[in-house]
Amino acid sequence: MKVEIHTLGAHGDGVAGPAGAEIYIPYAVPGDVLEVKLKGKQARISEVLSPSEHRQKPACGHFTRCGGCMLQHVKADFYADWKREQVINALSHRGFGGGFGNVEVLDPVISPPGSRRRTRLNAIGRGKGQAALGFSERGSHNLIDLRECPVLKPEIVDLLPALRKFLGQVMDLRQKMAVEITAAENGLDILLESRGEPSLDLRMDVAAFADSHDIARISWKDMSLKKPLAEMLSERRQPWVTFGGRKIFIPPGTFLQATKEGETALVSRMTPHLKEGGKLVDIFAGVGTFSVPALEKMAVHVLEGSAEMVAALQKSINLTPPTRPFSAEVRDLFIRPYLRHELAGFDVAVIDPPRAGAREQVAELAASTVPTIVMVSCNPATFARDARTLVDGGYSMGPVTPVDQFLWSSHLEVVSVFTR
């Protein structure tokens, strides 16, 4: 079947056909003329008959098999325009744009190749001292054994051959494991997730591997438990990152912005709105991406559901007490959102919720008297929903900045400042 691609869909697939009868074709580009094999509304490329001017050579030999990237074949300018368009489309679905709620969407800030500092890989034991380690194929549990990755930081990629060999030696046949790797500023932090208690032999092997490859820390999480907690198996030094010039020690499996470049872009949207001597509340604070830089000018109160992250942040702050007041609270914000009367007296609120957004918490913010709200989201659709709530509550939305920390994927961060 011969088709011509006219647009990219929300997940990065090429779209052909008339409205209501669209066909979705992975790894296609608008302007491509393709021979495809059709299966329902999905198709796969049999041959590129005439390539689009927006097509380029992919950067990775795993591309089209590994499910980590969808858009390596798209040139940078077209890719950036498509990312921006995703935000415009999400906002338009909530009534922004045109003559109603006009809003400016800026050009995206795109993290460069080799900058992603955290990843979650899967591993499976193959027997006879072998293991596969990598990402799954798109729409499949089949594991692509990762030999290269132009997205991850080089120190993560450089470890993969040794890590694969190590896992092959300690994993049973068909045993499955998740491997979370974070490139802290003083070395790699690895969290292994599998079922069962680590044996004495495994503990000794992990310590030896950490020593021989200068790994900062390796932890284990027993996923057979009802509430799995990370157990440290080897810590040669406690991993840390810096926010606002402060060293912040991180617990295993900590959420960090995926790239330092993306983190800088997001924080820079907040800093012009910090009020000297004022008060800021950081909602879904993590380990202090926004609250720690804010301490340079403002008193800060932190709200976070993870007790481990709050403890790590408080401990790090206590090492060099700030001149501004700092307080931290463990709170499940989905069960107990920070209420409008509790928000009274704060000059700035920062909120960076999970992908599903924070409908109840945003409703409390919309009913509050906080003069300035900085809202960050990793999902343009839920950002648009929550932005609509704030605007309907009397806030004005400033320019929206897309921040792309997951290069060549459909994922996208969004940040904007709302003023009462």
Image (cartoon, grey):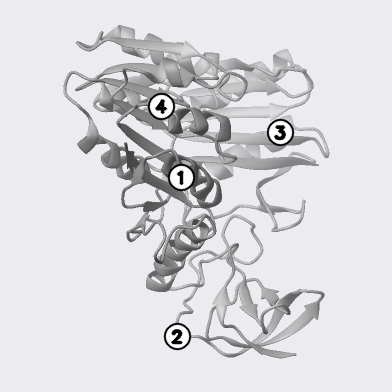
In three-dimensional space, the C-alpha distance between marks 3 and 4, rounded to whole angstroms, equals 57 Å
Position of residue 137 in the picture relative to residue 151 (left or right): right
In three-dimensional space, the C-alpha distance between marks 4 and 2, rounded to whole angstroms, equals 50 Å
**In the picture shown, does residue 295 fall above or below 193?**
above
**Mark 4 or 2, closer to the camera:** 4
Describe the element under mark 2 as helix, strand or loop.
loop
Q: Which x, y percent locates residue 84? A: 42, 62
Q: Which residue is mark 2?
A: 53
In-front residue for pair 161/105:
105
Q: Which residue is mark 1?
A: 387
Residue 169 numbered tag:
3
**Mark 1 or 2, closer to the camera:** 1
Q: Which x, y percent locates residue 91? A: 48, 56
**In the picture shown, does residue 178 fall above or below 56?**
above
User: Can residue 364 be seen in this snapshot?
Assistant: yes
In three-dimensional space, the C-alpha distance between marks 3 and 2, rounded to whole angstroms, equals 47 Å
Q: Residue furthest left?
A: 276
User: Can residue 237 be seen in this snapshot?
Assistant: no
Q: Amino acid at mark 2?
A: Glu
- The answer to whether marks 1 and 3 mark residues whose Cβ atoms lie closer than 8 Å is no
- Residue drawn at the location 68% of the way across and 42% of the way down: 122
Q: Earlier in the sequence, mark 1 or mark 2?
A: 2
Q: Amino acid at mark 1?
A: Ala
Q: Which x, y percent locates residue 250? A: 44, 21
Residue 291 numbered tag:
none
Q: Amino acid at mark 4?
A: Ser
- The answer to whether marks 3 and 4 mark residues whose Cβ atoms lie closer than 8 Å is no
In three-dimensional space, the C-alpha distance between marks 1 and 4, rounded to whole angstroms, equals 14 Å
Image quadrant for the N terminus?
bottom right
Q: Which residue is mark 4?
A: 368
